[in-house]
Image: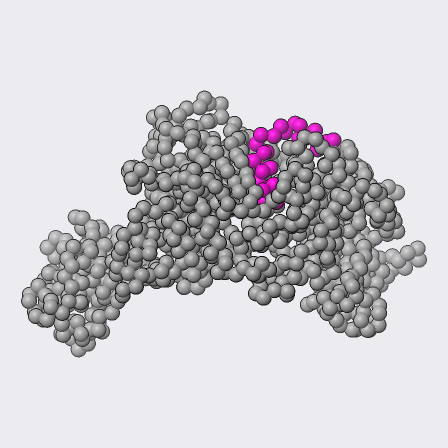
């Protein structure tokens, strides 16, 4: 049955405050996370870190923005638009859909998730827009969206995602075709090899390199092979492995790369087989050291690099694809495979090196900046650290161009120079976006994924981690291969096509469906700003702030994005002032980073400033909805304190994923949450004892509702309980008194953790109190309320907490059978078998009869648990005698 949303003054309670369909969101998110470029290709046009899934922010936007049926419209394929508020069909009656959202069943509004819904007169801000997901999803509902980010790369990526919806796709395709005509052949001529099958050339997909150092003892050159794998076998050889023979350097097939094998390659023109016996798993390097095959000397790789002034790199193998052999219908294993490097390949590399050094006008299209010192480039230089080893500056790299070889620099400079010549600014930026994104795979900082037969990308570990065996990809691209300009171009085109006419995938009856293309495109009313969000000057302007703020040192965006920035600025520095500096802003970044003398305290102070600015920018009836990476009760407390201090009250929290065992075992929890907050109303003073009772009841009620009506894990329920308890606390932030002192948010959070864990262990006393709170109670209620608890109807019956001897009656303090049960135990040999409920009902009975109770109070050494139960009994029955008999000497001394 629907009910009117709660309203405070002129503020309407939003659907997202009452419920959120995490089951449905998680269901589609699981699929989207594994096929991002097909579900929402607009987000795969360029790399950004820690990007939230689009389906999550679409759901957040829907449940945060849709609160007034008069301002909503829905557009169906092949159907004229109608105002949702005019529909009489209950499936599309928007008012009912809004009203029906609650904690027990929040899915009514989910029916509109795959619809082309427009919501009028909504203005949304994301002050930490990052990869722009929130802006894209909110704009699809017709909201005016404003984005901000300190980082120029984030600004550029988000800008192009929003531009995509209003970009002429045919003009863009023509620009890509023109670019291909201009530079593709020039680039591809350096990615050829002699086909091993016949007298013609094949395309190189990947070149394989190995770093080399001198032996510090005998002076021999040592190639730093951690093992001799080249790639897993394919097609008819999918049960074998391609490996490199360390003696003749042929690429051969073996059954098991971990076992000893014999090289059967024919050496030169002698017709003799190599015959070298070796174990491919056993290379010359490992654990940070390398070993000389000649003399056995073992030495540290980093030490040798610094002592020898760097390292050398040698080309030893390649992977090819031959279109000619494909046309001639050779078997697949001949068409695409691996081979050793030959004289032709070395000559081609030298030709590229010569052109790079001699051709004028190309050097200005590669970065000139040095790699700046930072926590991600040499963490040893700073006190304090972050996860992982970060020492690229100690591994022979000093300039950004050191991360590329000459052939890559030649190819990329030609590409960037041609892109810079385009006059259409929007087209030029999309070409630049494509070229920038291929940098992830076209550098000498990436390796090869042997098991999946493809290059890996630079940021697989969110760090600069130079491999000992770099992999060089084909910059423009062969028919096959990852991270090429051709493949990224196709992704950008798909992204623009999607942004112009988005579709939505949803699950129905277990199957995934895709909607017809929607008419409303992305970014029709959008603007983005590059700068510190703390300098935003809007006041009382936004209906919603939907964002994903930074989290401590989770991602050091500035240092990671410099890699893209120094290339993007080559083309953009004359157009946008934020691309003029040598690197992205660091000091202003709200992040814990020892490289700029910022720790946890600095982060907490600055995120508080950020929340304050958000509060200023929101309308008084606005909402802040954001995702956050949660780790433990300390971070919960800091977050709650920061929000409440600047004038917010938390009204709900929802998990995106949770580790239920850790949550209930009191360990550190690592999961993502959605936090909903509204500008706070007037706060009232309250005692902790009183608030604790409210929080306990809230936790119990929330858990009961969720367990009875939703298919959620214990961990998910725990997060939602936290949100409900935070809502209770937020009403009194800064005014909660315990023993004469004001409790901090962190102290309250610690208590809430304990209360939730306590409330999760529902026993006989809890069920009995629920029965007391039930109108027209019956045996059916005993069964229902006992379900999913540690109690059962037989337990309650044995304790005489109900009986059916003469109709159904509860075992209240004045029930004869219940008192007989208690008296028998009080008069026994020990009090150990007396529950707190037994004791309180006994005291209540003696007080009513005018009998002394003080001696029993002292004898039983009343603890907090017993006082808590007394408060709950007093609240549910309206009889405060339960609490008074424990603490008022005048009453208990009859």
Residue placed most toward the observer, 196 or 835 = 835
User: In the displayed image of the protein, which residue is found farthest to the top?
Assistant: 80
Foreground pick, 164 / 399:
399
Residue 174 magenta: yes
Residue beneath the point at 67% across and 56% down? 372
The quadrant of the picture occupied by the C terminus is bottom left
Q: Which residues are magenta?
A: 153-178
Position of 240 with respect to 645 (left or right) is right
From the viewer's perspective, tell me whether residue 762 is left or right of residue 110: left
Q: Residue 128: within the magenta?
A: no
Closest to the observer, 612 or 290: 612
Q: Name the residue at 6% across, 65% down.
A: 849
Asked whether the viewer can see residue 154, the reply is yes
Q: Quadrant of the N terminus?
A: top left
Using the image as rendered, state which of residue 233 and residue 697 is in the foreground: 697
- Residue at (62, 43) in percent of width and height: 578
């Amino acid at each position: 049955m629907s009910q009117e949303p709660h309203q405070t003054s002129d503020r309407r309670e939003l659907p997202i405050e009452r419920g959120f369909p995490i089951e449905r969101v998680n269901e589609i998110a699981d699929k989207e996370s594994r096929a991002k470029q097909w579900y929402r290709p607009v987000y795969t046009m360029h790399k950004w870190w820690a990007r939230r899934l689009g389906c999550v922010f679409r759901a957040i936007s829907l449940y945060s923005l849709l609160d007034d049926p008069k301002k909503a419209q829905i557009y169906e394929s092949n159907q004229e638009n109608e105002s949702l508020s005019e529909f009489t069909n209950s499936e599309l009656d928007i008012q009912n859909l809004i009203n029906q959202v609650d904690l027990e069943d929040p899915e009514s509004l989910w029916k509109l998730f795959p619809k082309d819904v427009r919501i009028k007169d909504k203005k949304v801000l994301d002050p930490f827009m990052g990869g722009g997901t929130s802006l894209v999803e909110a704009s699809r509902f017709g909201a005016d969206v404003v984005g901000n980010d300190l980082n120029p790369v984030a600004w550029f990526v988000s800008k192009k995602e929003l531009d995509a919806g209003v970009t002429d796709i045919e003009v863009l395709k023509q620009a890509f075709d023109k670019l291909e005509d201009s530079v593709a052949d020039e680039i591809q001529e350096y990615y050829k090899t002699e086909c091993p099958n016949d007298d013609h050339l094949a395309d190189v997909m990947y070149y394989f390199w190995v770093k080399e150092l001198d032996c510090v003892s005998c002076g021999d050159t040592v190639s730093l092979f951690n093992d001799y794998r080249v790639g897993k076998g394919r097609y008819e050889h999918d049960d074998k492995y391609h490996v490199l023979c360390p003696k003749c350097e042929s690429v051969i097939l073996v059954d098991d790369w971990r076992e000893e094998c014999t090289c059967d390659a024919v050496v030169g023109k002698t017709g003799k087989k190599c015959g070298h016996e070796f174990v491919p798993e056993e290379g010359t390097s490992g654990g940070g050291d390398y070993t000389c095959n000649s003399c056995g000397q073992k030495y540290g790789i980093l030490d040798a690099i610094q002592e020898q002034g760097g390292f050398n790199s040698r080309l030893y193998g390649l992977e090819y694809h031959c279109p000619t052999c494909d046309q001639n219908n050779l078997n697949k294993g001949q068409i695409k495979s691996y081979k050793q490097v030959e004289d032709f390949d070395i000559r081609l590399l030298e030709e590229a090196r010569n052109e790079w050094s001699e051709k004028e006008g190309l050097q200005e299209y590669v970065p000139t900046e040095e790699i700046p010192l930072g926590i991600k480039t040499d963490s040893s230089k700073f006190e304090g650290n972050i996860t992982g080893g970060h020492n690229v500056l100690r591994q022979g790299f000093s300039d950004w161009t050191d991360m590329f070889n000459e052939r890559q620099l030649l190819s990329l400079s030609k590409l960037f120079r041609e892109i810079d010549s385009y006059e259409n600014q929007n087209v030029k930026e999309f070409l630049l976006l494509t070229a920038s994104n291929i940098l992830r795979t076209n550098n000498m900082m990436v390796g090869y994924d042997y098991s999946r037969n493809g290059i890996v990308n630079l940021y697989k570990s969110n760090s600069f981690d130079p491999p000992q065996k770099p992999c060089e990809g084909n910059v423009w691209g062969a028919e096959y291969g990852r991270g090429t300009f051709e493949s990224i171009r196709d992704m950008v085109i798909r992204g623009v096509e999607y942004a112009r006419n988005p579709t939505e995938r949803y699950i129905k009856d277990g199957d995934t469906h895709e909607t017809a293309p929607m008419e409303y495109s992305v970014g029709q009313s959008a603007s983005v700003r590059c700068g510190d969000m703390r300098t935003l000057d809007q006041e009382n302007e936004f209906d919603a702030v939907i964002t994903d703020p930074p989290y401590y040192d989770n991602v050091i965006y500035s240092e990671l994005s410099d890699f893209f920035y120094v290339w993007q600025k080559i083309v953009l520095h004359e157009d946008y002032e934020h691309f003029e500096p040598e690197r992205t802003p660091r000091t202003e970044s709200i992040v814990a980073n020892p490289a700029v003398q910022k720790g946890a305290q600095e982060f907490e102070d600055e995120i508080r400033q950020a929340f304050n600015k958000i509060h200023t920018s929101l309308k008084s009836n606005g909402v802040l909805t954001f995702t956050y990476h949660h780790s433990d009760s300390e971070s919960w407390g800091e977050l709650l304190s920061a929000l409440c201090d600047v004038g917010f009250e938390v009204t709900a929290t929802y998990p995106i994923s949770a580790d239920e065992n850790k949550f209930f075992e009191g360990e550190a929890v690592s999961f993502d949450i959605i936090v909903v907050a509204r500008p706070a109303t007037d706060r009232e003073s309250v005692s902790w004892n009183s608030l604790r009772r409210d929080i306990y009841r809230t936790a119990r009620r929330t858990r009961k509702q969720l367990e009875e009506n939703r298919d959620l894990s214990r961990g998910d329920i725990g997060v939602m309980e936290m949100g409900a308890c935070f809502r209770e606390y937020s009403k009194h932030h800064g005014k909660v008194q315990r023993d004469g002192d004001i409790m901090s948010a962190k102290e309250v959070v610690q208590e809430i953790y304990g209360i939730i864990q306590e409330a999760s262990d529902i026993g006989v006393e809890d069920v009995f109190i629920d029965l007391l709170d039930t109108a027209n109670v019956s045996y059916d209620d005993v069964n229902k309320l006992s379900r999913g608890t540690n109690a059962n109807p037989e337990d309650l019956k044995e304790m005489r907490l109900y009986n059916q001897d003469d109709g159904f009656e509860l075992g209240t303090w004045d029930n004869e059978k219940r008192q007989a049960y208690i008296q028998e135990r009080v008069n026994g040999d020990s009090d150990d078998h007396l529950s707190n409920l037994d004791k309180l009902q006994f005291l209540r009975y003696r007080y009513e009869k005018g009998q002394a109770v003080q001696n029993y109070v002292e004898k039983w050494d009343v603890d907090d648990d017993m006082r808590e139960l007394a408060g709950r009994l007093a609240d549910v029955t309206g009889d405060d005698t339960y609490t008074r008999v424990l603490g008022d000497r005048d009453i208990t001394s009859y």
